[in-house]
Amino acid sequence: QVQLVESGGGLVQAGGSLRLSCVASGGIFSINRMGWYRQAPGKQRELVATITRGGSTNYVDSVKGRFTISRDNAKNTVYLQMNSLKPEDTAVYYCNAHTFSSKDYWGKGTLVTVSS
């Protein structure tokens, strides 16, 4: 079992920045890849960014150049630095852990609201 706890969401004006954090605990050695997803009102959950155990990253096109995913293995923490935020970035952001056995674990989510 892997437990994930997100933090760092909030209200920010367009053009501003936020940093999300996700702390993993439990079966951390089973984790292959971690990532951030988001779900806006009335929309499906979508991938935002992922980072593998080896540090390879992947981003959805809409956030490339604005968001950066990183990890601190010593702290079992993954971060999502979000710059130049836009109103369309408003969503609940979820941390995800994908294990070597292809199980997925999710945090409870943190709300990001970007005002225009």
Image (cartoon, helix red, strand yellow):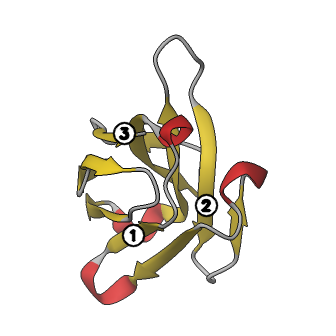
Residue 62 relative to residue 1: left or right? right
Of 115 and 70, nearer the camera is 115
Secondary structure type for disc 3: strand
Tell which residue pokes out farthest to the right in this image: 61
Measured Cα–Cα span from mark 2 to mark 3: 26 Å
Q: Is residue 42 above or below residue 35?
A: above
Tell which residue pokes out farthest to the bottom in this image: 74
Nearer-N-terminus badge (1/3)? 1
Measured Cα–Cα span from mark 1 to mark 3: 25 Å
Q: Is residue 8 above or below residue 96?
A: below
Secondary structure type for disc 1: strand
Q: Which residue is mark 2?
A: 50
Residue 78: give its label: 1
Secondary structure type for disc 2: strand
Residue 23 relative to residue 51: left or right? left
Residue 59 spot, x, y in % from top left:
70, 59
Residue 88 spot, x, y in % from top left:
55, 36
Residue 115: give its label: 3
Q: Identify the residue at horizontal 78%, vertical 53% (top origin).
A: 61
Q: Is residue 18 above or below residue 89?
A: below
Residue 81 relative to residue 28: left or right? right
Check the picture and name the quadrant holding the C terminus: top left
Q: Residues within 10 Å of mark 3 (few under 14, many from 20)?
A: some
Q: Residues within 10 Å of mark 2 (few under 14, many from 20)?
A: many
Nearer-N-terminus badge (1/2)? 2
Nearer-N-terminus badge (2/3)? 2
- Identity of the amino acid at label 2? Thr
Residue 81, picture quadrant: bottom left
